[in-house]
Image (tube, grey):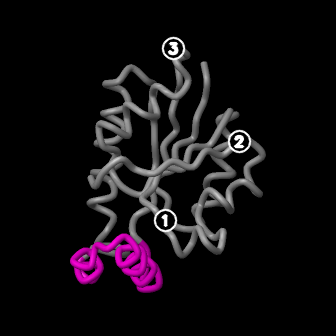
């Protein structure tokens, strides 16, 4: 069985589930999902800049309304549960956990713990972080010792 660590920031959509579960053809895949709740004000600014870059001005204005910190934990747990249920319904083994601090350290530890064959980072575009190679996928490539695949979410969850 192929083992993938899937790092996400929101609930997987049905298109996301289909995409990641079919990446390896008919080979069975076990997913170990990491989800990090929304961050702090600095993250809010970067998200707003990304929204503006995408021409989504209304989304940029609503970034203040997005729960952060402790308020984000409940919705994040629900997003993780929804994602795990969808992966299992698609025929894959799936388990997961939330990450609160140092997501790349948690990623490296999980890769070693489960003997992962790859890491898949599935997020919305983060243009500012990607430009400076500070996004999860760029930084993970130097930490985890397995191939890292960066994918963009298919639609808003």
Q: Earlier in the sequence, mark 3 or mark 1?
A: 3
Extreme-front residue of the structure: 55
User: Comparing marks 1 and 2, which lies closer to the viewer?
Assistant: 2
Give the number of the disc on residue 26: 3
Residue 19 position, x and y percent, is 42, 34
Task: Identify which residue is drawn at 66% across, 60% down.
Answer: 138
* 47 in the magenta segment: yes
Q: Is residue 37 left or right of residue 82?
A: right
Residue 10: x and y, percent?
36, 55
> 21 or 106, which lies in front?
21
State the separation of the CA atoms marked 3 and 1: 34 Å
3 and 1 marks in contact (CB < 8 Å): no
Q: Position of residue 133 (x, y in %)?
A: 66, 68
From the viewer's perspective, is residue 20 above or below residue 43?
A: above
Q: Residue lying at the far top in this picture: please name it.
A: 26
Q: What's the mark number on residue 81?
A: none
Residue under the image location 51 percent in, 33 percent down = 31
SS for tag 3? loop
- Of label 1 and label 2, which has the lower sequence position? 1
Residue 9 at x, y percent in the picture: 42, 57
The magenta stretch spans residue 54 = yes
The residue at 36%/78% (across/down) is 52
Name the residue tied to disc 2.
147
Circle 2 — which element? Answer: loop
Residue labelled with disc 1: 100
3 vs 1, front mark = 3
Front-most of 8 and 149? 149
Marks 1/2 in contact by CB < 8 Å: the verdict is no
Q: Quadrant of residue 117?
A: top right
Decide: few, some or many residues near mark 1? Use Cα within 10 Å; few <14, some 14-19, many ≥20: some
């Amino acid at each position: 069985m192929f083992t993938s660590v899937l790092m996400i920031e929101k609930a997987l959509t049905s298109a996301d589930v289909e995409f990641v579960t079919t990446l390896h053809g008919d080979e069975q895949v076990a997913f170990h999902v990491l989800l990090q709740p929304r961050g702090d004000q600095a993250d809010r600014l970067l998200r707003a800049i990304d929204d503006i870059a995408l021409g989504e001005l209304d989304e940029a204005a609503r970034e203040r309304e997005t729960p952060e910190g402790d308020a984000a934990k409940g919705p994040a747990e629900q997003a993780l549960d929804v994602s795990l249920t969808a992966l299992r319904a698609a025929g894959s083994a799936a388990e997961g956990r939330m990450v609160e601090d140092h997501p790349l350290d948690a990623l490296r530890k999980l890769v070693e713990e489960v003997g992962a064959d790859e890491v898949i980072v599935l997020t919305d575009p983060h243009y500012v972080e990607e430009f400076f190679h500070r996004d999860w996928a760029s930084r993970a490539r130097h930490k985890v010792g397995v191939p890292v695949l960066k994918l963009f979410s298919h639609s808003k969850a």
